[in-house]
């Protein structure tokens, strides 16, 4: 009986040490992420970055996304609901981070749509039809072109624009900015410059609501 009690206590202590170590490790990583984001705050968004919401909103969400990313698609309606819950108080900025094979060409099309002021409608259509132009996590640009042909996008102009160095440089700039900010997967979120270090719907909502509380007193 005493031996059993000793083993049980040892196991509890072992788990306690492990839990404490994990907590301090995650806390250290969060501190490092926040410090890095503060250091590179100037690259969080660019003048060309697509954005939606009140330009004077005191809370800005920056999302690094890949249109072929299933999690990005899943977060899209959640972000819409969050903005609708706090009308006029949140602005959303989108940054390109094409990590899936073939996505580099797809984001060029989205940026071409942005130049026609049709980014948000095209992105929405991209998410709705994602399964038709993404196969086994690989984006199919030709299928994406077929999809956007059903939108109001000027296809001929878009096909010319995607060849421009302007769009290529913008995509490369977003990728470089993501690297500086240590964003390695999508979606990657920042709220008023603070990185979402613990990923999840509730964690994002909590961070947004904390910033809303701090800035709309």
Image: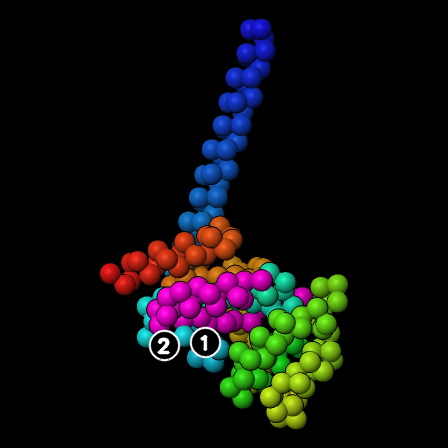
Query: For this rendering, which residue is in front, 170 or 130?
Result: 130
Residue 124 picture location, percent across and down = 58, 75
Residue sticking out furthest to the left: 217
* Numbered mark located on residue 55 in the image: 2
Decide if residue 40 is in sight here. no
Mark 1: give few (<14), some (14-19) or many (20+) Cα within 10 Å. Answer: many
Q: Mark 1 falls on what kind of element?
A: strand
Residue 132 in the figure: left or right of residue 9 = right
Decide if residue 56 is in sight here. yes
Residue 172 picture location, percent across and down = 57, 74
Q: Mark 2 falls on what kind of element?
A: loop
The residue under label 1 is: 51
Q: CA distance from mark 1 to mark 2?
A: 9 Å
In the image, residue 15 above or below residue 32: above
The colouring scheme, among rainbow, by chain, secondary structure or one colour, is: rainbow
The residue lying at 58 percent from left, 62 percent from top is: 74
Residue 27 in the figure: left or right of residue 111 = left
Residue 145 picture location, percent across and down = 69, 82
The reply to whether callout 1 and callout 2 are in contact (CB within 8 Å) is yes
Residue 8 picture location, percent across and down = 56, 17
Mark 2: give few (<14), some (14-19) or many (20+) Cα within 10 Å. Answer: some
| Residue 96 part of the magenta segment | yes
Query: For this rendering, which residue is in front, 14 or 181?
Result: 14
Region in magenta: 74-100
In the image, residue 151 above or below residue 187: below
């Amino acid at each position: 009986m005493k031996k059993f009690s000793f083993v049980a206590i040892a196991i509890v202590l072992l788990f306690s040490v492990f839990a404490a170590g994990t907590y301090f490790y995650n806390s250290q990583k969060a501190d490092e992420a926040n410090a890095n984001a503060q250091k590179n705050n100037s690259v969080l968004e660019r003048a060309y970055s697509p954005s939606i919401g009140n330009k004077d909103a005191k809370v800005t969400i920056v999302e690094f996304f890949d249109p072929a990313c299933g999690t990005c698609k899943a977060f899209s309606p959640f972000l819409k609901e969050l903005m609708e819950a706090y009308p006029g108080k949140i602005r959303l900025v989108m940054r390109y981070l094409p990590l899936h094979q073939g996505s580099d060409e797809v984001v060029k099309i989205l940026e071409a749509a942005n130049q026609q002021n049709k980014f948000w409608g095209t992105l929405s259509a991209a998410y709705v039809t994602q399964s038709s132009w993404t196969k086994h996590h690989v984006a199919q640009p030709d299928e994406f072109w077929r999809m956007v042909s059903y939108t109001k996008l000027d296809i001929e102009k878009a096909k010319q624009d995607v060849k421009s160095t302007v769009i290529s440089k913008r995509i490369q700039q977003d990728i470089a900015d993501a690297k500086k900010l240590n964003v390695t997967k999508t979606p990657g979120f920042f709220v008023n410059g603070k990185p979402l270090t613990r990923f999840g719907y509730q964690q994002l909502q909590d961070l947004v609501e904390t910033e809303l509380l701090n800035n709309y007193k």
